[in-house]
Amino acid sequence: MVSNLSKTLIHTALLCEAQPIIQYLKLLKNKDVPNMYENETHILMVSGIGKTATLKALTPIFNNYPVKKAINIGIAGCKDNTLAIGTLCCTTHALNNIVFTTLSTHESAIDNNEALTTVLVDMEAQYFFDVCKSFVPHENIYCLKVVSDYLSTTIPTKEFVSGLIQKNMALIKEIV
C-alpha cells in the first residue's frame, strides 16, 4: 500500500523498545506488513536485532512510503559508567536535555572497553543510518539510545528495556 503523505519513520530492533512509543503515538498494527505500526503521521518498524534484520525491515518502508524524518530508538551498551543506566543519548545531533555522544555498531555484544572506540555500542544504528541517508536528508536522521548496561553480555528483560524507553518518553516525544 503506497502512501503519498510523507511520514516520520521510527525504527526499533525490539518490540519491547517500541511498545511505549506505540502507546504514546496511538499506532495501529499494519495488517499487510509484519512488525509495522502506523498512524497518519508516523510509521514504526520493529526489525529484530542486527544488520540483516534491519536492512530487511527497512526495504518495504522506503519502497512504499515517502519518509521525511527517520529515527532509530533503542538501548545501547556503554563504556562510560558516569552515564547512568537509563540516560537518553543522541549520537547524531546535539539536542537540549539529551546527552550527545559517540556510538559504534557491532555484529555481536562487546564486553571489553579496549575493543570499543566509542562511548556507546549497539547492533543496528549504523545500518539504519546507511539505508536512511539514501532517502532522507542527513539532518532529519536521528539515533537515540538509552544506556542499558556497562558492556554486559547479559540480555536485559523485556520489562526492563520497555521501562527504560518509557522513562525517557518526555524527551523522546520532542523528537518524534
Image (tube, grey):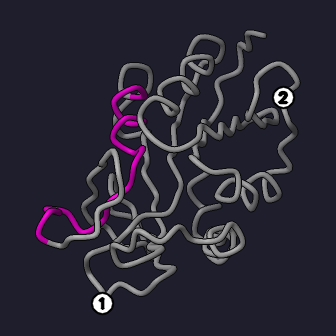
Q: Is residue 37 above or below residue 17?
A: above
Q: Residue at x 61, y 21 (%)?
A: 61
Q: Does residue 139 sit above or below 135 in this rendering?
A: below
Which disc number belongs to residue 145?
A: none
Mark sitting earlier along the chain (1/2): 2
Q: Residues within 10 Å of mark 2 (few under 14, many from 20)?
A: some
Kindly identify the residue that appears in the image at 51 percent across and 79 percent down.
Answer: 86
* Magenta-drawn stretch contains 76: no
Q: Is residue 1 above or below residue 40?
A: above
Query: Is 39 left or right of 98, judged from the image as shown?
Result: right
Residue under numbered circle 1: 82
Q: Which mark is residue 30?
A: 2
Question: Picture coordinates of residue 172 (x, y %)?
Answer: 59, 63
Element type at mark 1: loop
Q: Looking at the image, which residue sits at the far front?
A: 154
Task: Please check the rendered image and state whether residue 119 is part of the magenta-colored stretch, yes or no.
Answer: yes
Q: Quadrant of the N terminus?
A: top right
Magenta-colored span? 114-132
**In the visual, does 88 lie left or right of 139?**
right
Q: Is residue 106 left or right of residue 53?
A: left
- Residue 100: image location, x then y, percent: 31, 67
Label 1 Cα crowd, 10 Å radius (few <14 / some 14-19 / many 20+): few
